[in-house]
Image: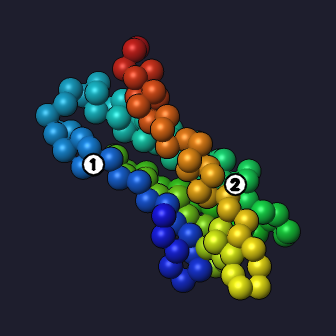
Amino acid sequence: MSIKDCTLKIEYDMTEVYKGLDKLSDKTKKAAEGAMKDTVVNIANDAINGSPVDTGNNRRSIRYLTKQLHGEIFSTSGYGGFLETGTRFMGARPYFKPALDRHIGKFTKIMKEKLKW
């Protein structure tokens, strides 16, 4: 998780874990990529639901991207990082980290479910 220009960004890359992805069967490769997408979508949805609401702008600004085994979730509000970590004038109101913690360990389970078909 990183904060740059007051924008919060979670980046998760499983490529190193699956270095031999090109050698895996198509079924396994598709399962891993599907599990990545599902995991990122679940984290993003949880972050949206957990985002502090005043005007709803930060909640509406949360986006995600996935490509193969790389996923990103980020807020484009310009103050998502301030909400997550707080400032000297405002306490932290974390919504990204709790969402990440709730879902990150489910990647393997989702992948196994996708391999069952």
| Disc 1 packing (10 Å; few <14; some 14–19; many ≥20) | few
Side of 58 where 101 appears, left or right: left
In the displayed structure, 87 sits above or below 66; it is below
In the displayed structure, 96 sits above or below 108; it is below
| Mark closest to the chain's N terminus, 1 or 2 | 1
Query: x and y percent of residue 1 in the render?
Result: 48, 64
Side of 95 where 106 appears, left or right: left
Residue at (35% x, 35% y) in the render:
32
**The disc labelled 1 sits on which kind of residue?**
Thr
Residue at (28% x, 27% y) in the render:
28
Residue at (71% x, 85% y) in the render:
88
* Local SS, label 1: loop
* Local SS, label 2: helix
Q: Quadrant of the C terminus?
A: top left
User: In the drawing, what numbered circle is on residue 15?
Assistant: 1
Residue at (49% x, 34% y) in the render:
106
Query: x and y percent of residue 103 in the render?
Result: 55, 41
Query: x and y percent of residue 70 in the render?
Result: 37, 52
Residue 97, picture quadrant? bottom right
Which residue is labeled 2 in the image?
48
